[in-house]
Image: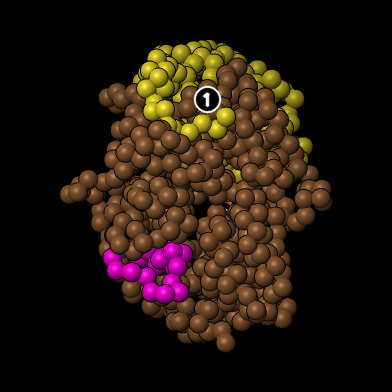
Chain colours: A brown, B yellow
Amino acid sequence: MAEKVWEAHLVHRAEGEPDLLYIDLHLVHEVTSPQAFDGIRLAGRTVRRPDLTIATADHNVPTTSLDLPIEDPISKKQLEVLTANCAEFGITCFNRGDANQGIVHVIGPELGLTQPGMTIVCGDSHTSTHGAFGALAFGIGTSEVEHVLATQSLPLTKPKTMAITVTGSLQPGVTAKDLVLAIIGEIGTGGGMGYVLEYRGEAIEALSMEGRMTVCNMSIEAGARAGMIAPDDVTIAYLEGKEHAPKGEALADAKAAWLAYRTDEGATFDREVFIDASAISPQVSWGTNPAQVAPLSSTVPSPDDFADPAEREAAIRALQYMDLVPGTPLKDIRVETVFIGSCTNSRIEDLRLAASIFEGRKVAEGLRVLIVPGSHRVKAQAQAEGLDVIFTAAGAEWREPGCSMCLAMNPDKLAPGERSASTSNRNFEGRQGRGGRTHLVSPAVAAATAIAGHLASPGDLS
Amino acid sequence: MKPVTVITGRAIPLNRSDVDTDQIIPSDWLKRVERTGFGAGLFSEWRDDRDFVLNDERFQGASILVAGPNFGTGSSREHAVWALMDYGFEAVISSRFADIFFSNCTKQGLLPVTIAPEKASALLEAVTADPSLEITIDVARGTIEVPAIGMSATFTLEPFTTERFLNGWDDIGLTLRNEKDLTNFEGERPAYLPTTA
Ligand code: SF4
C-alpha cells in the first residue's frame, strides 16, 4: 500500500537522486513554521499551493477560558506570527478560538481533509496519525516545511515496509491504545526505524476510525515515520458527509480509487510481525519510553528481567526517575494528576468512553483531572451529548482544545516529582513538565484511575 | 541560496575543539520565531567573557571562522548555521566537522572546509598571530591560499555539493529545476482530492 501511494505521487525520478514526491496536504502549526515562512520571504519565493495547506494553533495555546489573555509573551508572539504568515501567503488558518481550531492531527480527519491514498506532511512527528485512512503521512523538519511550502513536493528516499498483523479480537474493555502500547512493547522504540508500518488483520479491521488513528499515531514511538491501515467501508463511512470529502459523482470515483490502494494479496513486506489481540489486557507504561510498558494487572519489573544490557541500564535509570520499586503491583501506584487528551486520545469516542466511567462517580480526593478535547468540533459534540456535565459533576476540569499537557508547552504542566496517568503518547523524562512522571494509559484506565486515585481499570471500580 | 565561488577575507581563530551546537547557539534562542537575527546569539555564553575572540576588535569584519577539530557536534538544530551566517561568516574551516552540522551548512550555503589537521593548526596559529591575514578559498578548485605567508591547502567536497555551491542551488532550487514535472503532475491530479480553500 505504501508502495502504491509512493508511486502515485512520483513527480521526478533520476539515478543517484532521491525521488521527488508530490504532497497532497501540508498541515502547519505555530511552532515549526515561523522560520520556514521567513526562509520563503528571504529567498523571494511564494507558497506554491496555499490551497493544499492548512494551519492551526495547538502546541502553545492555553486551555483555560478563551476570555483570558495568553500570559506567556513568547507563546502569544508565536500565535500572532502564525496568523500574520498565513494572511501574507493566503493560507487558511484556524487560530485560538476559531470553530475549526484544534490539534492538527485531530482537525485534518474531522474536516475530511485526510483521505486514503494521499501524501500528508506536517512539521510534527505524530503526523503518522493520518495513516489510519490509508494515507502516507509523516513528520518533517523546518527546512522540509519550507521546501513543501515552496514546491508542494519533497525529495525522499523510499522506506522499507513492515506488516504488523493483529489476529483474533480484543477482549472487552481493551482499547486501541492498549493494543498499540503492547505492539510498541513488543517491537521496541527502534523496531520500526526505516520502515512504514502497515497494521492489518481482523483486530485492526474491527477498530473504529478513532481507534485506528490512536494506533497509527503511536507508530513514531516505535521508530517508524509512518503507519498505515488499508481503507475499507469503515473509512468510507467516516468520510462520507465530512466538509472536504468528495460528494456525489466525485465520491464514486474516489471510493474506487481509495480501495485500489489496498495492499495486493500476496504482496511481500521487508519484515513481518504477528500479534495475538486476544492475549492483550489493559497496558500501562512504567518507564520513560513508550516501550517500557506492562499489563496493568502485573508488577513493576526488575532490571534483572532484561537480558539485554542496554535495556537493563535503561530500566535502572527509568525506575530511578519514576521512583518505582520493582515488584510493586502497578495498581498500587498513586497519581496526583490525570490527563485525558492529546492527538492520541482526545477524539469524541475517547471522551465518550471516559464519560461512561465517570458517570455517577467522583474523582478521588485531591486529584487534578484535566480533560482536554482535541478540537473545538470535538468539544462542541461532547457538549451536545452532555459529556462535559458528566465530567464536571465528577470533579474533573473541562478545558479548551489544544495539545496541553501532552508536551507542557502551555501552562498545563506537572510539577517536579508529580505523577500522572496520561492518555498522551510520550512518557519521556520531563515531557509533561520538568521532573514530572508520566504513566501512559488508555482513556478507560485514565478515567478509572481518576476515580480510584491509583492506577486502575474500570473493572476495579465498585 | 547564493552562489559561492571564491571567498576572500580575514579570519577569526576559534582555538577550541568539540564545539557543539548548544555552544554555537544556546537553546533559549530556539523559541524565536525569526530566522534572522541569530548572529546576536552566536556563542552568546562565551561572549560574556571580554577576552573571547569574537570580542577582539582586531578581528571585526572577518568572514571566515577557523575552528578547532570536531566542530558542530550535538543537536541537529539548523539555528547553529543560521547564527554563523547571520553573524557574517561565509566559510568555516576545521580538520573535522560533525555530520549533521556539515550537511546543514551545505543546505544553507555556509561553506564547510575540511583540511588536514596539521594545516588546520598552522592556520589557526597564523591567524591568531596576524589578524589582518587575507585568506582566499576557491570552491571550484578546492583550494585555500594564504599568500602573505605562502601557505596553501586543499579540500574536497562531493561533486554534487560543489555544483550546488557554485550554482547557488539549495534543495528547493534543485526541486524547482523540475518545475515542469511538478506542473504536469498537478495537471493530472484527480479532481476528487481535497483543497483547503
Ligand atoms: S498532542 Fe502532543 S503529540 Fe500530538 S501534536 Fe500536540 S504535542 Fe504533538
* Residue B8 versus residue A131 in the image, above or below: above
Taking the image as drawn, is residue A174 in sight? yes
Taking the image as drawn, is residue B100 in sight? no
Q: Quadrant of the C terminus of chain A?
A: bottom right
Please state which amino acid type lies under the numbered disc 1. Arg
Q: Residue furthest bottom?
A: A462
* Residue beneath the point at 72% across and 81% down: A365
A181 falls in the magenta region: yes
A60 falls in the magenta region: no
* Residue A40 versus residue A123 in the image, above or below: above
* Residue beneath the point at 32% across and 32% down: A8
Identify the subunit bearing mark 1: A
Q: Residue furthest front?
A: A248
State the SS at label 1.
Answer: loop
Q: Quadrant of the N terminus of chain A?
A: top left
Quarter of the image holding residue A339? bottom right
Which residue is labeled 1 in the image?
A: A49
* Residue A277 versus residue A5 in the image, above or below: below
Instruction: Write the start and end of the magenta stretch as one range.
Output: A165-186
* Residue beneath the point at 47% across and 78% down: A296
Quarter of the image holding residue B35? top right
The answer to whether residue A13 is left or right of residue A416 is left
The answer to whether residue A66 is left or right of residue A7 is right
Residue A290 at x, y percent in the picture: 47, 63
In this rendered view, identify the residue nearer to me: B21 or A358. Answer: A358
Residue A83 at x, y percent in the picture: 70, 34
In this rendered view, identify the residue nearer to me: A298 or A93. Answer: A93
Residue A166 at x, y percent in the picture: 31, 63
